Image: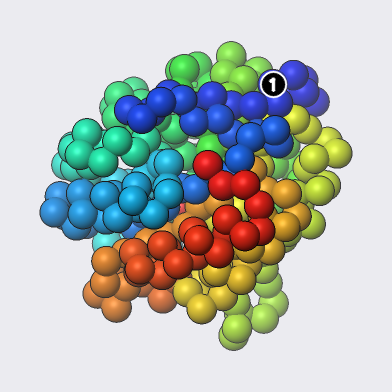
Amino acid sequence: YRHGQASEVAVPTPNGVVYFGEHHPVVLIAGPCAVESEAAIVSTAKRIKAAGGSLLRGGAYKPRTSPYAFQGHGESALEMLAIAREASGLGIITEVMDTADVSRVAKVADIIQVGARNMQNFSLLKKVGAQDKPVLLKRGPSATIDEWLMAAEYIVAAGNPNVILCERGIRTFDRQYTRNLLDLSAVPVLRSLTHLPIAIDPSHGTGKSQLVPTMAKAAMAVGADSLMIEVHPNPAKALSDGPQSLTPDQFEALSKELEMVGKVL
Ligand code: PEP
Ligand code: MN
């Protein structure tokens, strides 16, 4: 792989540059699955900032299995994210699903997310590779490590070396207890293959909020550079992924526990 050079990704945010990489503290990314309202995203962002988070996540464009499920508020959600960025000082990470939206998303996002379902959307990879915001590339639900790294290679080959890999669980035959199977062995395996920073998403990786704190600590123990955690002010009422979302109080408690495992930004 040609993406061997950069061992860190530097992300400018309103509160200074956040570094992702092996030689830096673990970066906490948190926020709701989807941006639902301005008031909710602003208050959630402030709670996340107070609890030690560095970046706010929240989908404007949502890749939903059913076309009848909530699809995200789109452009207006991008505006809400921009407001939450100003109000909290957190950097913003949000997903882009369509090549036509890349420049619009790049205007608001400090990191552009390519979701699991688009890991091998090669036109999208080329497009995010041709702009200058860092990209968080999620592992496809059935992607091998090599397929994932080659997808990252598309972004790098198009001119953008700032790629963060994010493991979010792969398909499992037993969906009764976990939505996906979080592949924590991907961390040491990737470490031997690439210098790209590695994030773990235990929220999509388990699908169950009760499992998130334990798997987040486990992710830190295997050497993840960043954690992405879904946080919602009222998970029972969330428009998507409520069952796997922590409350702001739970996120704050987790953040304190993580400090005991290792160095958190
Ligand atoms: C997300 O993080 O919002 C998301 C949809 O996750 P994934 O692409 O991993 O399913
Ligand atoms: Mn989600």
Examine the rendered structure and indicate whether residue 38 appears above or below residue 171: above
Residue farthest to the bottom?
A: 176
- Vertical order, 239 against 143 (above or below): below
Give the image quarter of residue 177.
Answer: bottom right
Answer yes or no: is residue 264 visible.
yes
* Residue at 78% in and 32% down: 194
Looking at the picture, how far across and down is residue 56, in whole percent?
A: 36, 45
Q: Amino acid at mark 1?
A: Ala
Q: Position of residue 101 (x, y in %)?
A: 33, 31
Residue at which label 1 appears? 6
Q: From the viewer's perspective, tell me whether residue 83 is left or right of residue 132.
A: left
Residue drawn 58% across the image and 59% down it: 258
Instruction: Estimate the x, y position of residue 119 in percent, counting from the top left.
Output: 58, 43
Rate crowding at label 1 as few (under 14), some (14 to 19) or many (20 or more) other CA atoms within 10 Å. some
Frontmost residue, 92 versus 249: 249
Picture residue at 49% right of the left edge, 31% below the top? 18
Give the farthest residue toward the top.
159
Q: How many marks?
A: 1
Q: Is residue 81 left or right of residue 128?
A: left
Residue furthest to the right: 192
**How far across and how far down the image is residue 203, in percent?**
51, 64
Element under disc 1 = loop
Question: Compared with residue 148, is residue 73 higher up or lower down, i.e. above or below?
Answer: below
Judging depth in this view, the residue of 255 and 230 nearest the camera is 255
Quarter of the picture holding the N terminus = top right
Tell whether 161 sits left or right of 60: right
